[in-house]
């Protein structure tokens, strides 16, 4: 066997791991989890498992595509950061053309799957997420600190995809789910950005901790957003999606998260930032588990919906069986 064919074989054997790194597989799995939660919370009359499978698979493909395209576009800057320079395209282990083709195929496949097996509303939301991530979030990262807001919007849409897959409309409950995910991402990502602020600065990314006055503002925003998660968590119970167990759980988790953020606000060092970031990784799955565990108390009673009449006025209605 020639050396060239042996290298080709080694590269092919490495492809699964390269694809997993290219698409940020673990991050994409979290997106799928929130989509599944939105689907389950909307399924008050029983879960359509086949529809859930198509929804999860389609959303997963779109999330993988977005992450891969992001890496293709940021290859040059990723080379400048120790945290990212070993990714497939910055390291040269995969060409940008290869990565781009793979990402585009994933994106088209995911959108087509959602459109054909779920509904056009879910496919439209997935497309909006993909476009926002690539055309707004990625270009804004070296330009404005607003990139974090846009990225949080992108992260808030997946549970709404799960919701519309079942109900084919966006009700207040779907917006609450999206809002929880949106707000959670701010302390989650800002505390991470604090940990790597020097690397972000060297790579030319305009993250909040690297701009003038940014370190103090980052700690302040982190604290405020964790505080905001407490009423948002309760809103899920007040909207009729969950019961008392979830409400109490959300309050406890919210106060613990706020305590970590308060320590970060007072100390403003790497240790407290890391503590806030690590608890953010624990907060979300625990909150979602409590939400799903308590959904059994909700059928379609007292579910608040929003209908837009021809005069564009908003009517709030409740359903009682």
Image: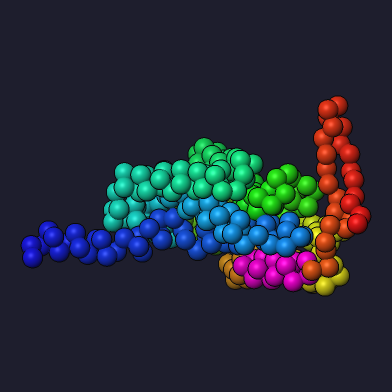
State the residue in front, 65 or 296: 296
Q: Which residue is drawn at 92% across and 55% down?
A: 320
Q: Residue 298 placed where, x, y %?
A: 83, 63
Quadrant location, the N terminus: bottom left
Main secondary structure type of the part rendered in magenta? helix
| For residue 169, above or below residue 218 | above
Quadrant location, the C terminus: bottom right
Q: Residue 251 placed where, x, y %?
A: 81, 68
- Residue 151 falls within the magenta-colored stretch: no
- From the viewer's perspective, tell me whether residue 130 is left or right of residue 43: left
Q: Residue 114 placed where, x, y %?
A: 55, 47
Q: Give the range drawn in magenta.
A: 279-295
Q: Residue at x 46, y 46 (%)?
A: 109
State the residue in front, 63 or 241: 241
State the residue in front, 191 or 309: 309
Q: Can residue 306 be spotted in the picture?
A: yes
Q: Residue at x 40, y 55 (%)?
A: 22
């Amino acid at each position: 066997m020639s050396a060239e064919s042996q290298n080709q074989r080694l590269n092919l054997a490495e492809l699964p791991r390269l694809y997993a790194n290219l698409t940020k597989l673990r991050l994409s799995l979290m997106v799928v989890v929130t989509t599944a939660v939105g689907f389950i919370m909307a399924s008050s009359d029983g879960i359509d498992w086949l529809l859930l499978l198509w929804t999860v698979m389609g959303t997963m493909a779109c999330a993988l595509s977005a992450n891969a395209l992001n890496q293709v576009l940021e290859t040059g800057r990723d080379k400048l950061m120790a945290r990212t320079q070993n990714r497939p395209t910055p390291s040269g282990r995969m060409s940008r053309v290869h990565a781009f083709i793979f990402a585009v195929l994933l994106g088209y496949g995911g959108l087509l799957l959602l459109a054909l097996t779920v509904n056009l509303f879910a496919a439209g939301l997935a497309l909006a997420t993909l476009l926002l991530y690539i055309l707004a979030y990625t270009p804004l990262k070296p330009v404005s600190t607003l990139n974090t807001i846009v990225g949080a919007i992108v992260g808030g849409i997946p549970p709404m995809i799960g919701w519309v897959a079942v109900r084919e409309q966006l009700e207040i409950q779907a917006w609450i789910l999206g809002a929880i995910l949106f707000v959670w991402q701010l302390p989650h990502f800002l505390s991470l950005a604090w940990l790597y602020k020097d690397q972000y600065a060297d790579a030319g990314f305009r993250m909040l901790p690297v701009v003038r006055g940014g370190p103090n503002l980052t700690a302040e925003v982190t604290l405020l957003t964790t505080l905001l998660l407490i009423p948002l968590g309760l809103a899920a119970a007040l909207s009729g999606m969950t019961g008392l167990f979830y409400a109490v759980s959300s309050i406890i988790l919210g106060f613990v998260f706020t305590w970590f953020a308060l320590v970060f606000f007072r100390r403003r060092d790497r240790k407290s930032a890391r503590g806030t970031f690590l608890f953010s990784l624990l907060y979300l799955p625990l909150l979602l588990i409590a939400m799903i565990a308590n959904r059994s108390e909700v059928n379609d009673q007292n579910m608040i919906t929003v209908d837009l009449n021809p005069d564009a006025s908003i009517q709030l209605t409740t359903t009682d069986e």
